[in-house]
Image: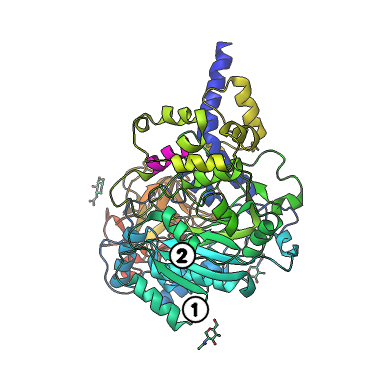
Amino acid sequence: MVSINKSFLYGIFFASITWIVSLYLYAQLTKTLQPNSNSFAPTFEPKLNKFLEKQSFGLEKGQIHPDKGYLKKANGFNSNSLVDKLQPIVKNAPNSSNKFEQDLFDLGLVQNDKELKIKDEGYKIHAYNVLISNKLSYHREIPDTRNPLCKDVIYPPNLPDASIIICFYNEHYQTLLRTIHSILDRSPENLLKEIVLMDDFSDIKNLHENLQQYLKNQNLTNKVRLFKTKQREGLIRARILGAQKAKGDVLVFLDSHIEVNQGWIEPLLSRISSRKTNVVMPIIDIINPDTFGYSSSPLVRGGFNWGLHFKWENLPKGTLDKPEDFIKPIKSPTMAGGLFAIDRKYFIDIGEYDAGMNIWGGENLEISFRIWMCGGSLELIPCSRVGHIFRHRRPYGSPDGQDTMLYNSLRVANVWMDDYKDYYLNQNKQAKNMDFGDVSARIQLRKELKCFDFDWYLKNVYPELTLPNDNEDRLKKKWSALEQDKFQPWHSRKRNYVDQFSIKLANTSLCLQSAKDTKTKGSYLVLRPCLKSKKQIWYQTDRNELVLAQLLCLQAGKPKPILYKCHELGADQEWKHKSGKNTPIYNLGAGTCLGVARKKVNATVEMRLCTEPELNTWDLVVD
Ligand SMILES: *[C@@H]1O[C@H](CO)[C@@H](O)[C@H](O)[C@H]1NC(C)=O
Ligand SMILES: *[C@@H]1O[C@H](CO)[C@@H](O)[C@H](O)[C@H]1NC(C)=O
Ligand SMILES: *[C@@H]1O[C@H](CO)[C@@H](O)[C@H](O)[C@H]1NC(C)=O
Ligand SMILES: *[C@@H]1O[C@H](CO)[C@@H](O)[C@H](O)[C@H]1NC(C)=O
């Protein structure tokens, strides 16, 4: 009995931490399904799930690289002809490199010191690769990630029109313009009433003026209306202000670093036109912050935990049984917050946002609870896809250093959660005596709207949420209600090796190996006399990783590459070269090449501009 209980407790423990991991593994298992095969499984990329794993709330990635910059010493120029020589390297795998990737590969190459500086500064201010963004067309093509069935859907002729509301604070200029152009390019003229840009008192010099000038020069001021707040308001109040300016039938709130995909807006508007209280969300595809590669996200829904952090989770069992299920609206207990559409009048009627909330955080759960509890519904629309740059971190905080997530969450708990708020307070002891401002107007709103209570929400909308006091039986039932994907444990998961070789500095007999051993994470790489030994054998995967002795991945770092656990996110672990002799080895995330400062035993390998063929040309030696 004891042992059963014990293993059950382990079960609880594992269920909670491997929850997200299982999504990831599910992705691993299903990603072999081709997007256009007759099985209608959506295309899975593990990136969102890796992101999910790091994620506690909102839309930023955990901080994987605290400060990006790859090069110690930079001199000279990378040449384009060099890039031309680097072939896509997947040998035995099907066509995985497409034209989108090849373009990004070319654009990512750091050409000189000046570019290197732009890139490093960009990571500090924006937490993504602005060098690539600067070079990328405002009208670039992105892969159409919709389920093929979406193309056959016919929408009613008289859809409501939309005002797109984009609030931003210190957004990168070119990235913001790409956001705007993707919307102009991919939304039917008659459905796009306007784009409302709300500059939340950005202080990047000339950002506002440059935007103003650009819109004027491009004759876009009729469609794109730019406003600026009089002081820093934060996302929540900026959105309320933006919504007040809007004239369209529907409000679509979007982040400022996104690109909308083909046919993104029709399914959203259509669903709202069928019932005004449907609040709908696109699927959030992933734009890689290092390479700007665009990839599809799996179908997952929004939930939360008792720390009041948003989380993604698997769909309830039976949600995706038939092919058509993959394009039907999917109910979601909560929203991530960045991207959603709502009837404009309905937005006002249900109380906009809580204007007492500061800067950022918690507003997504507040509006989610409010929508469900006060008679509306919240749905994901699989045929609507919008790519979002998952930044490495949120590059700004609150001006006065307040923990706005905590402050705002307290307001959510006290207005909407009735006695269930104790579960939150028990997890956040410091919150118990904290001030959260005046919530009487929001409590009044709840009364006026005659909303259901939180107990109703939990029973009817989110019965799968586990409660801290659930007993064994209840927990088991809740878990089994969600898709539990068969998954392989990490250690036996297959990596797809397509090649193996030692990496020799050209015209020397020095090979690349770990400065320590093949198992130590964080080891630098050094040159040592070539031996026919396991510790110098690199295995290449179908994801263009280089794995030493089938253990750790080669990862571009600052300023030197290291061996690290394979994260399968590409970017700093994704390498290109032409097979055989005399090849540079180029890193996609860094935009630079593997090289050394001296042709000597024990020289440490660095990330260098892809010049100086003497010092960064390698032979890939297959025995
Ligand atoms: C791979 O791509 C090439 C050109 O991009 C194309 O001609 C070829 O048919 C593709 N092969 C497969 C198996 O799709
Ligand atoms: C500017 O755009 C408006 C429509 O938005 C159009 O009527 C007008 O002709 C355009 N002007 C120029 C100079 O292109
Ligand atoms: C290289 O480093 C190894 C390990 O630290 C050391 O044993 C060896 O003597 C060094 N070789 C040279 C030529 O410096
Ligand atoms: C290696 O040697 C060959 C022949 O001597 C020469 O053509 C080539 O440029 C050299 N490569 C490098 C990287 O030094």
Magenta stretch, overall SS: helix
Residue occupying image coordinates x 72% and y 40% = 318
Nearer to me, 81 or 312: 312
Q: Earlier in the sequence, mark 2 or mark 1?
A: 1
> Image quarter for residue 565?
top left
Tell me which image quadrant ligand 1 sits in.
bottom right
Amino acid, disc 1: Leu
Circle 2 residues within 10 Å: few <14, some 14–19, many ≥20: many
Nearer to me, 327 or 65: 327
Amino acid, disc 2: His
Label 2 sits on a secondary structure element that is loop
Left or right position of 222 against 333: left
User: Residue 220, labelled with which disc?
Assistant: 1
The answer to whether residue 548 is magenta is no
Residue occupying image coordinates x 53% and y 35% = 18
**Can I make out residue 343 in this image?**
no
Quadrant where the N terminus sits is top right
Measured from the top left, where is residue 600 in percent x and y? 26, 58
The boundaries of the magenta stretch are 405-413
Q: CA distance from mark 2 to mark 1?
A: 43 Å
User: Residue 577, labelled with which disc?
Assistant: 2
Residue occupying image coordinates x 57% and y 21% = 8
Label 1 sits on a secondary structure element that is loop
